[in-house]
Amino acid sequence: WGLHDMAGNVYEWVWDWYVAPATGAATDPTGPSSGMFRVNRGGSFRDHASLARAARRNEWPPEMREGPTLGFRLARTAP
């Protein structure tokens, strides 16, 4: 992927709405257009090492967008 040091620093807040379990294409999924929770990915320095994975996926309320264990994940559609 060309990404380095992605796991275990902070959770990554992403724009996607949460749906469980994740449905649709595994590559570049679009997800639902609305929902109650946003997705956060990864783990933070406060988690056990087994939870610090870039693929880890959780739900958080949309208003929860800042804090010492939260960053954000930048992504764009490939040309």
Image: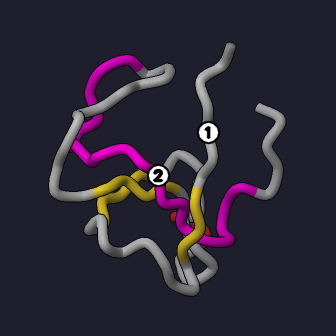
Residue at 59 percent of width and 24 percent of height: 77
Q: Mark 2 and mark 1 in contact? Answer it, CB < 8 Å.
A: yes
Sequence-first disc among 2 and 1: 2
Residue 33 belongs to magenta span: no
Q: Check disc 2 and give the amino acid type.
A: Val
Left or right of 2? Residue 59 is: left
Q: Which mark is residue 14?
A: 2
Residue at 42 percent of width and 48 percent of height: 15
Please tell me whether residue 51 is drawn above or below residue 32 in the rendered image. below
SS of the residue under disc 2: strand
User: Which image quarter: residue 29?
Assistant: top left
Residue 16 belongs to magenta span: yes
User: Which image quarter: residue 34?
Assistant: top left
Q: Which residue is mark 1?
A: 75
Camera-side residue of 9 and 66? 66
Q: In x, y percent, where is residue 4?
A: 82, 50
Residue closest to the far top:
79
Q: Check disc 1 and give the amino acid type.
A: Ala
Highlighted magenta segment, given as a residue range: 6-25
